[in-house]
Image (spheres, rainbow, N blue to C red):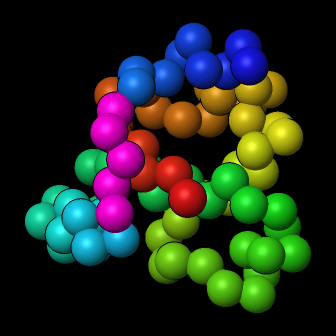
Amino acid sequence: MEWKQFLTPVANLDPDAARAFISDHKEGTYTLLDVRQPGEYEKARIPGAKLLPLPQLADRLKELDPERPVIAY
């Protein structure tokens, strides 16, 4: 996938590590990225998450701030 060239590979975070990261960092200093489909996002989402469905990711990468860490789910 072409979009992978724009992302820095990192280790996966388990749910507890993701929760810890979110609680330890001020909102707005990272991007919480929901890559699911809109219907899934509407049913349930993490507050503050940005919806960017995986099939659209390559075309919408410019919407992400490259200076902020991204937690994708």
Q: Residue shown at 19%/69% (left/top)?
A: 20
Q: Residue at x 68, y 54 (%)?
A: 35
Q: Main secondary structure of the magenta part?
A: loop
The reply to whether residue 26 is visible in this rendering is no
Which residue is farthest left?
24
The quarter of the picture where residue 17 lies is bottom left
* Residue stretch in magenta: 10-14
- Seen in the picture, residue 70 relative to 35 is either above or below; the reply is above
**Figure check: 60 above or below 46:** above
The image position of residue 19, as x and y in percent, is 28, 72
Give the quarter of the figure containing the C terminus.
bottom right
Q: 44 left or right of 67?
A: right
* Residue 46 against residue 27 in the figure, above or below: below
Instruction: Tell me where residue 16 sits by quadrant.
Output: bottom left
Q: Is residue 23 left or right of residue 18?
A: left
Residue 15 % position (x, y): 36, 71
The image quadrant that residue 25 belongs to is bottom left
Horizontal arrangement in the rendering, residue 66 relative to residue 4 (left or right)? left
| Frontmost residue, 5 versus 56 | 5
Is residue 9 visible in the rendered image? The answer is: yes
Residue 59 on image: x %, y %: 80, 26
Image check: 7 left or right of 1? left
Q: Which quadrant does the N terminus fall into?
A: top right
Residue 28: percent from left, percent from top: 33, 55
Q: Residue at x 33, y 55 (%)?
A: 13
Residue at image position (27%, 49%) is 29
Whether the magenta-drawn stretch holds residue 47 is answered as no
Give the total of numbered labels: 0
